[in-house]
Amino acid sequence: MMPEVEQVKNNPTEYLYANQLQALIRLFAMNSERRVVVVSTIYTGHILLRHLPIFKDYNPLDIDFNTEHVHPFYFDNRDLANEISTVIVPVVLNGHFSVAIWDKEDNTIHYYDSLDWTLNDETKQALIHAVRSLTGNATTIRLYHTNEGKHNEQNDGVLQYTCGIHAAMNAESWIFNNKQLYKPNLNIVQERNRMIHLLEKLTEDTIPRYTPFQSLNSNSDLANTSNRRQMKKYISQKRSNQDYCEKKQAKNTEAHSRKRKNSD
């Protein structure tokens, strides 16, 4: 088991890590019959991290998802020949997670936040840019407030940090429950345990087939080799993402040095 999964499991007030939220949504996408693209948490997360040295010159709007050089930034569950049906963006805010979901049927980004935080313009533009790069479509954002009854409010008592669980549930319900996200009898403890169980199984060498809204169990049929390979690749992606950004920074630094030298 990954140490951070065990940490979340053993501490009821521990929140999901960004890579865990990403892994869960990728699992859901892998099992969808439609083509679902999942944008990495690194995409929106780095909007908040530009003050760190390795992200100093990083701008999410520099990314064109149609190029072969941005593999750390998105996951595709189907052949490229298939038309994209859905784009899911796990959104990393300052100590909080939400989710944005674009659907081709209405060409709209549907944004769900279990705490109804305000979404700043920079993040809105990053979401619109991601969808446009992947689909070629100019789109708009529809923000939903929990009082509309479209998705559940994060009001979880002692489980104060379940925003990642809510974001994962919303993505899962969009894919497998006909876009119906609200659960009138939500048991957040049960849902948190189910998500942790999924994460535990995802860290094993053998990844069972996922059944929507059910925990994975060791007696399930094995998923196909391609899916197992994809998920194993994802588990090590956090390291490759950092390597990518470090190389990007080195390249930018070199370019700046050449520019200064030429100006001298």
Image: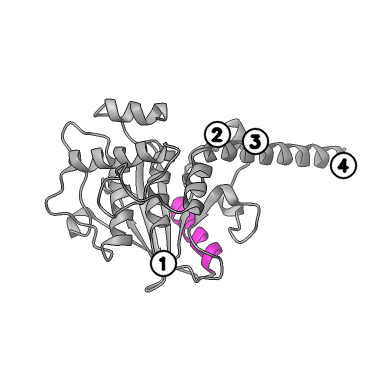
How many circles with numbers are drawn on the protein? 4
Farthest bottom residue in view:
105
What is the secondary structure assignment of the residue under circle 3?
helix
* First reached walking from the N terminus: tag 3 or tag 2: 2
What is the secondary structure assignment of the residue under circle 4?
helix
| Rendered image: mark on residue 51 | 2
Q: In this view, does 65 lie above or below 216?
A: below
Residue at which label 1 appears: 34
Q: Position of residue 14 (x, y in %)?
A: 30, 29
Q: Which of 78 and 189 is in front in this view?
A: 78
Taking the image as shown, residue 179 lies to the left or right of residue 190, namely: right
Residue at which label 4 appears: 262
Q: Which amino acid does label 3 sit on?
A: Glu
Q: Which amino acid does label 1 sit on?
A: Arg
Distance from Cα at disc 3 to Cα at disc 1: 34 Å
User: Disc 3 vs disc 1: which is toward the camera?
Assistant: 1
Q: Where is residue 101 in the image (x, y as percent from the top left)?
A: 38, 59
**Residue 110 placement: quadrant:** bottom left
Q: Quadrant of the C terminus?
A: top right
Q: Nearer the viewer, residue 178 or 63?
A: 178
Q: Position of residue 23 (x, y in %)?
A: 42, 44
